[in-house]
Image: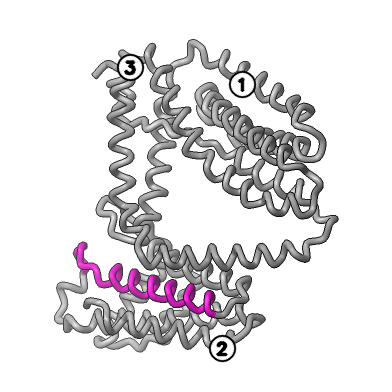
Amino acid sequence: MNNMHNIWKMRFGHFVNEVQKYMRFIVTGHIAIVFVFVAGAAGYQYSEWLKVAPASFPAEWLVAATVGILLAFSRPTTLIKEPDQVYLLPLETQMPVYFKKAVNWTFWSQLIIPAVVYIVTIPLLKTVTELSSLQIWLGLAFIIALKYLNVVIEFNYRFANRGQAIVVDRLARGLLSILAIETALTSSVYLAAIYLIIFFAYKMSLQKRVIGQPVPYEHFVHLEQNRMLRFYRFANYFTDVPHLRGTIRRRAWLDSAYKWIVFSSKNTQLYLVFRTFIRTDDHFYLWLRLTAIAAVITAFVDIAIVAWIVVAALAFATTLQLKVALLSNGEFRMDMLFPIAPTQRLKAVEKLLRITSVVQSIIVTLCAIAQPHFYMIPIIIIVVSELTLRLSKK
């Protein structure tokens, strides 16, 4: 196993399998339907706005700022693991072969987002600017070149500096990327090539600093662990990730939520369930995130049927996932030692979820108050949540 091509191939295969294992729970039928409706509604709103977009709208700067910021965030994906700090030391001279494959994968995997964002803005550029189709597509090629340079630069910067002051590096690259894209769109790609030369010179200087330095295994291990942890936390909103343990926060500003619970043995589970929901990051942020998504969509989408479908799907997802999470018996709890009826926890969870659905409906309705038929939104959220509670497995 001393061939770097084989090591990368094995690591990459394991990574793909791990992602696919959880993505099948994330990309489900109802989520796909929501995405289709949201994309359709967003596309319709976008096309309608383009009809009245003013000619003075700063489209070039908007595109340059959005894409430039995305280009600056080029965190490398190395798939380095903690044992590599010991077992790959004898092969350190061969690591450039491994890292070349890592940089290439980072580039191709991260290119999708800025490229899609730019392509989505092409109708805007054609509407409010005088750019030809050739200039617009040359702009896309320019962005691809910038992305590759950003990826290589961030990798070499992290290698040379162990990730220290990476914010300063990103800020500099972000500003240069914005200016480069704006110049390519307003002047010419040839003039913007000056920025490519600056990026290339910066890349070469970092590559010279990397030569002879030991591989910063600890930094790359830390990056990989955090990257996979973010993915597992996201996946945990859709399915149970066994090795993931959520963090606990007190959230003292919500202590008043417990005061209305009467001190009584019959309310033991209700009190515990409320504390579990409020203090567990996974549960609380799941509800907060889905509520925020529903609020933002209903605030900007003025197609009633689309807004209703979205809030119904998100209400269903919120109730179902919180119910499963709060009724999970995977861990030992102290209340299991006391003579409390088993049905108490189910009733407590259902009461909590009815309250959260009401709060969610109020927040989303207030955000959608300027939209047509907004009064239907709280009814839909509460009805869907109640049906989910009653029809889902206990």
From this view, report whether residue 106 is shown above or below residue 90: below
Query: Which quadrant of the figure has residue 319?
Result: bottom left
Question: Which residues are the magenta region?
Answer: 305-333
Q: Nearer the viewer, residue 185 or 126?
A: 126
Q: Which residue is mark 2?
A: 375
Give the image location of residue 275, x and y in percent.
36, 72
Distance from Cα at disc 3 to Cα at disc 1: 26 Å
Determine the main secondary structure of the stretch shown in magenta: helix
Question: Mark 2 or mark 3, which is nearer the start of the sequence?
Answer: 3
Quadrant containing the C terminus is: bottom left
Do the residues under discs 3 and 1 have CB atoms within 8 angstroms?
no
Distance from Cα at disc 3 to Cα at disc 2: 65 Å
Distance from Cα at disc 2 to Cα at disc 1: 56 Å
Q: Which residue is mark 1?
A: 203
Identity, as a three-letter code, of the amino acid under mark 3: Leu
Which residue does the image show at 52% across and 66% down from the upper left? 38
Mark 3 neighbour density, 10 Å: few (under 14) some (14–19) many (20 or more): some
From this view, report whether residue 203 is shown above or below residue 366: above
Identity, as a three-letter code, of the amino acid under mark 2: Tyr
Give the image location of residue 281, x and y in percent.
41, 62
Q: Which residue is mark 3?
A: 89
Residue 107 highlighted magenta (yes or no) = no
* Kind of element beneath mark 2: loop
Give the image location of residue 49, x and y in percent.
72, 65
Question: Mark 1 or mark 2, which is nearer the start of the sequence?
Answer: 1
